[in-house]
Each structure stands twice: as structure tokens, then as C-alpha cells.
Image (cartoon, rainbow, N blue to C red):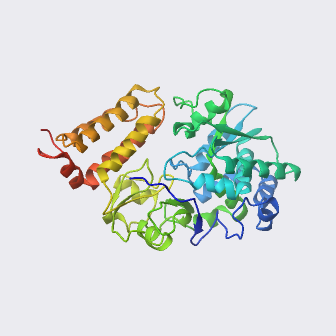
Amino acid sequence: MERRRCAPTIRAVHPTLLLPARASTGPESLAEYRARGGYDGLAAARTRGAAWLRGEVATAQLRGRGGASFPTARKWELAANAAGDEKFVVGNGGEHEPGSDKDKVLVARHPHAVLEGLLLAGLATGAQKGWIYLIEDMHGPRAAIEQALAEAKAAGLLAFPVAVHLGPTTYVAGEETAALNAIEGKPAKPRKKPPFPGEAGLFGKPTTVNNVETLAHVAWIARHGGTAFASIGTAESKGTLLFTLPASVQRPGVHEAPFGVTYRQLIEQVGGGLRNGGSVRGVLPAMSSGFLGADALDVPIAYETLRPLGSSPGCGGVRIVDDRTDVVALAVEIAEFFMREQCGQCPPCRMETNQFVHILKAVQQHKGPGYDDKIRKLAEFSRKKGFCSLIEMAAAPVVSALGVFAADFAAAAGPGQPGGAS
């Protein structure tokens, strides 16, 4: 079960692209950021042009860090090639997934890296205005980005106006089209796609929405080059990723590691091992990903390695299952979260999330023969029937838990034929 997590800390392992070692834990000032090459990439891009910048990001093979991992260069090309004389760009920091603190920490500690990335994304796509989108309870990140905006404006670095918008404290408010609705003053609920934001986003205009971690990587790429970025990581997963390790390890908080690191290395070397001295039975890479068993702890973390295992790195908010974890209770907790946080506008999503909770609680009450078949059929029936991906995100941890921890569910379900029809 999720316990209260300690205050986020930042610890990095080589190579460090986004989290440089600093004496201070406060927001990095403009002077500090410029001392390490900050805004040099923006200057280079203004000289070399939008096509050069898009080319560097394509060479880098950067993927979005919000969880969906869509190629950043492809998203930029959609907006850049869209017709229209008014375009927008949004830096999405609307993080509200339990277990993940990376966007909050990044904006609070390194706001200029995010802001430079936003300005670069605007240059690459032809935007005339930008927004930094946060959640209304993110007081530290808000103060940091507002101070960075004031410093950048005074230094003449802003090529277009940038505003800060605060969304509601709901999970779906961080979905990119829900964020656009919130900025427009509408309920923060996802839109049906297509059209995609790059075609018709804010106020019907082409809009590029990038996660704030993605934008910080863009700033690094513009400064050091796409080839340098692509030299880090694995064949299909380039650069570094921010991971949030839970309070169950010795060193919890936000850590940076290159793709290709393993969950065993994250837990033991970066996190210092489990506090309780227990053994790791599995991990959940992010709440919206699929569980991985102990036999996957040494698999290199990458999109191409986790995909065949039915999982993904997601946003990097790692949960650890040890020998004291009540796996069925954890599955119920996750299912209840998605049931609460679904926005209510898609009937299949309402049905799926409610039924997951109902079936899993029946397992807890020893009434569960047939639970496996029911859950898998429900997940398959609902797939791709929502405006956003929450319908798949809610299914991934529940369905995967049935396979990875089959014995736990069978024991909890009680007499009958576990996993099959009664």
C-alpha cells in the first residue's frame, strides 16, 4: 500500500543532463543557469533557424517524457506544417500521478531550463504565445517559474509572451487536451482526437504541448547537439529519464539516470536498497504502466525492452512490491484511484474503472473465482473507447498484476478455480 512519502530529494547518477549538482536547493537563478551555458541553445537556434532546431531534435530521437513517449520532432512537424498565422505552445507540468514528483521538482529547481525549452519549442513550431501549465497546488513550482519569467523578460530573452496557468487538482487535468480546455476556461476534461492539438488546439489554433521534462531536454539538445544526446541510452530510447523512487528505499526522491539502467540498479545503487531489508518481488514503473516481476529487475529500462513485457517506463514514478506488500490491496488502491479520477464523460471508462474495483474487492472478500477472465474481457472490451488513454492506463496495472502475482490473487480469491470460470 502507498505510504506517506518523504519530501522529494534530487540525486543524480552519471550522465546528468537535467539535474546538475548545486549547493542550493532553491530555484536556479538566471545568472546560475547562464553560467552553465543556459540560453546558449536558444541563441544558436535563433541564428540557425527553426528547421535546424527541428533537425537536431529529430537526430536526438527525443521522445516525450509525460508518459506517452511520442517522438518530439514528429509532434513539432505537425504544428510547424499546419496552416495558420497564429500558433501556440504549452509546457505541460500538470503532474498529478501518485508516486511521481519529477515535474514539480524540475520546475521548482530548474525553471529556466524549462522556460528555455518552451521558447525553443515555440521557435521550432512558429508559435506566437506560450503557457506554462501547472496544477493549482504546485506553489513552489509556480513561484519558481514566475521568478524565471520575470528574469528572462528583464534580460530580453522572451521572443513571445508566456503566461502561467493553473489547472485543477485532478489526474485528467494533466492530459494535454484537458490542459488546453483548462487554459480556455472550460472544464479540464480531455477532448476527442482527432483533430490533434498540432492541428487545432488552443482556441482552434495549431498548438504544441510538451511535457516540462521534455522541454528541459530540448534546451540541452539545442546547446550540445542531437548527436550527443543520442549517444546516451539504448537503441530506441535516448538520453536520460527522471525517476521518482518511493519512501520504501533508503534514498527516496527524484533521480536522473540514463536509459539502459535496470530497476535493480535504481533500487540498490541509486536508492540504497529497501529500508525494511526485504526482498523485491516486482516493480510498477509508473501507476499507468504494467507490473514487472522479479525476473525483469535486470532488464535494461527502455521503451523497446519493456514493451514486449507489457509495460513501459511511463513517467518514472516507481512503486516497489516487496515480500510484505499486499498485492491485491495495492491493485484495489490503484483501481480506486482511476475510478475516482476518470472524468465521467466516456461511459466505457466509467464502466471499466467501476467494475475493476467491484471485481477486485470481491477477490479480497474471497468471492473471486472467475475474476481473471472477467477483468481481461472487460479491459479488452473497453480498449480505445475513451477520449483519452486513461481507459488503457487503468487496465495496465490491474491486468498485469493478475499475471505477475497470480498466486496472490488465487490465494485471496479462495476456493474455486482461480483465474477461470466458476
- Depth check: give the residue in front, 410 or 123: 410
Left or right? Give the position of 148 relative to 250.
right
* Image quadrant containing the C terminus: top left
Residue 305 point in image, percent of width and height:
40, 60
Residue found 74% across the figure and 55% down from its top: 112
Look at the image and tell me whether residue 384 can be seen: yes
- Depth check: give the residue in front, 372 or 127: 372
Q: With respect to residue 417, does 305 lie above or below?
A: below
Residue 51 point in image, percent of width and height:
71, 50
Q: With respect to residue 225, does 349 lie above or below?
A: above
Residue found 35% across the figure and 50% down from its top: 330
Look at the image and tell me whether residue 199 can be seen: no
Residue 233 point in image, percent of width and height:
52, 66
Q: With respect to residue 17, does 411 lie above or below?
A: above
Image quadrant where residue 323 sits: bottom left
Image quadrant where residue 386 sits: top left
